[in-house]
Image: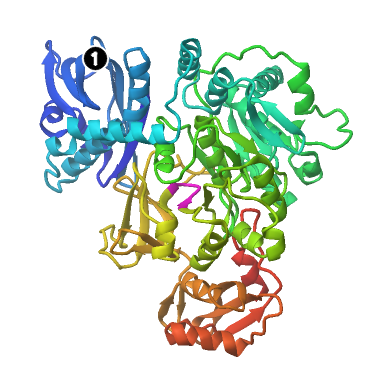
Amino acid sequence: MRLEEQIVVDTPSERVWEFLADPSNYHRHLPSITRWEVEGDRASGLGARHSMRMRVGSAEVGGLIEIVEWDPPCDMAWNSVTGLDQRLRFRLRERDGRTTVTLRLSYVAPGGLLAFISERISGPLVRQNLRDILAQVKHQVEGTGLGPDPAELAPSRLEWVGHQIGSVRVLAEAGLIRPIRPDRLARTILALNRWGPSPAAGYEASAIRYPNEAAIIDERGAVTFAQVNLHTNAIAHAFRSEGIGEGDGVAIMCRNHRYFIYATLAVSKLGASALYLNTGFAGPQLAEVVKREKPKAIVYDQEFEALLKGATRRKRFIAWHDGDTGRTPTLDALATGGDQSAVDPPEEQGRAVILTSGTTGTPKGAARKPPESIEPALSMLDRIPLKARGVTLIAAPLFHSWGFAHFTIGLLLSSTYVLQGRFDPERVLEGIERHRATAVPMVPVMLQRILELPPEVRRRYDTSSLKAVPVSGSALPGDLARRFMDEFGDVVYNLYGSTEVAWATIAGPEDLKAAPGTAGRPPRGTILRILDERGSELPVGETGRIFVANEMLFEGYTGGGSKDIVNGLMSTGDVGFLDEGGRLFVSGRDDDMIVSGGENVFPREVEDLLANHAAVAEAAVVGIDDAKFGQRLKAYVVKKPKAKLTEADVKGYVKENLANYKVPREVEFIKELPRNPTGKVLKRELQQAA
């Protein structure tokens, strides 16, 4: 198991190294380390040996360790000589007088099923130990005091046991703890140990446990778990024969269908990294992203061939096709006509690179390594009733972080995926009825489109199997959630997060009814803080920048740069506040604030108000340059069919409910708002048109 955390220290690297190079500091100041004694004549430096003990989960482990890397003031690492097989490494990188300290711990637990389960459940607590160590290093070298008592930072045995019990409860409620034939159990554990936390592991395990059950259902029918595993073996072998291997990048531009998953699994089996391209991109955007990311190959649906002409000198493979593909090989042919034997696991797992929405500029690539424990999945399963062997109709685009999240959760649950190439509101309802779907992850605009269907069409379909409609990707108006639940039951779960931080808060039906418009509360394993511009935490009710820490924080943009980080917490890029119940309300983007006549206005507040108007279908508010006021508000409004609404009506409604300076100075009625494929409003297009 390998865990990694980092923190930024406001001192040069030499000062950090001075602290780390003195072994006497470890026992006295670092949490989790309970003993540190020099063995032999050398106290520090390459080859120095120390007898140590440290807490890992509920147990104290340790033994004799030896310093195997010593490169002042940059890198230091030790390996175990006796005791638990472990390696710990400090990495220091200085920039502009500040030092980023990365701490990585790799260790191998004893064998056996209990150890296997414990390793995957206890990961978050071990990760917290690493965070605590880094926090204490920061306290010491910055001279801000001793900081928290190390004994208080380390989780107690009771806390660890409680966490484990809670994890087992979540697994049991999700149906993941169930009887299994001993031979299949042994093979499953072997497969998971061979592949680690990767998409390949999920299908290897499901193919062992449920070989003949449906894994994917799309417009071309159903394929079983065993078939998916064999087909992706063949595609992986074919990719390898074309020179694609560990560490290479493969771009995937597919709609929601089996070949998106086939390509993802084949790339995972090779240890390559997958770059997911937005199906709504224009040709120049595609060419720019491919030039920047430099994938070795592109897998794409035939319909996108003309758009990809600018992405030259890449190996090409066609996914979904409806006709002659010429000389370009298809995944179909590779899957059924190639070598379906098992693939040897790579030494290092590849990354998934999800592109940001690009609503305010050029899309960036956000790289994320596979999770090192099942804690991210447990945090969602603890709040949303997703069950093992459930049927999930993934309506959200798979290339988007929200659709992809449900693909990865489904790997743990051995879900049957129902996939439709294009979103159609009536087809979604028909798919729920036909396949008895239990979960349908969507983006908010999809809920709106379903409710726009005539009542007789909506009620034509039996949706009683539906247990959860998880929603994310853009703001969910409180009225939209209420109206959807009035018709389809208490099934809406609103998740707030981003491509960079994954899910940060979850609001269930009770939250959405008690506090319409809320983004919910942080799930287990997630820390959320509202900070001011100096990095200090703000009290309840005060608006500030939203910062999050969890296991799924991204590793940085592929083109360089990252989100702001304060004490291990990463900025989401939004501003908001917490209410007395600990529920988050998102006010808008931290760079979206409009200053009009010296007053600060967040468009989200005005948009939410307009969305509640009986005659308004949807609305967007933007800031327009103004010589007198600096910026002025302009509202773009889509009226409901046959609704009568004037500019004066809109302005009067806002004036009755909000401060005078929040009233739009212009109102323009349009047929529909420009949106990207995930439903986010493209405000830059509205500003350009103003």
Q: Is residue 370 left or right of residue 291?
A: left
Residue toward you, 299 or 214: 214
* Relative height, residue 360 to residue 289 (above, below): below
Q: Is residue 674 left or right of residue 595?
A: right
Q: Quadrant of the C terminus?
A: bottom right
**Residue at point 18%, 41% (across, down):** 141
**Residue at point 49%, 10% (across, down):** 183
- Residue 462, image x, y percentages: 65, 50
Which region of the structure is painted magenta?
496-503
- Residue 104, image x, y percentages: 33, 28
- Residue 322 part of the magenta-drawn span: no
- Residue 641, image x, y percentages: 70, 75
* Relative height, residue 626 to residue 249 (above, below): below
Q: Quadrant of the N terminus?
A: top left
- Residue 502 part of the magenta-drawn span: yes
**SS assignment for the magenta stretch, majority:** strand
Instruction: Tell me if I can see residue 124 in this picture.
Output: yes
**Residue at point 54%, 41% (across, down):** 406
Other residues around mark 1 within 10 Å, as few (<14) / some (14–19) / many (≥20)? many
Location of residue 342 (image quadrant): top right
Q: Is residue 285 left or right of residue 485?
A: right
**Residue at point 11%, 18% (across, down):** 37
Q: As shown in the figure, which amino acid type bears the numbered disc 1?
A: Glu
Which residue is identified by label 1?
66
Residue toward you, 18 or 609: 609
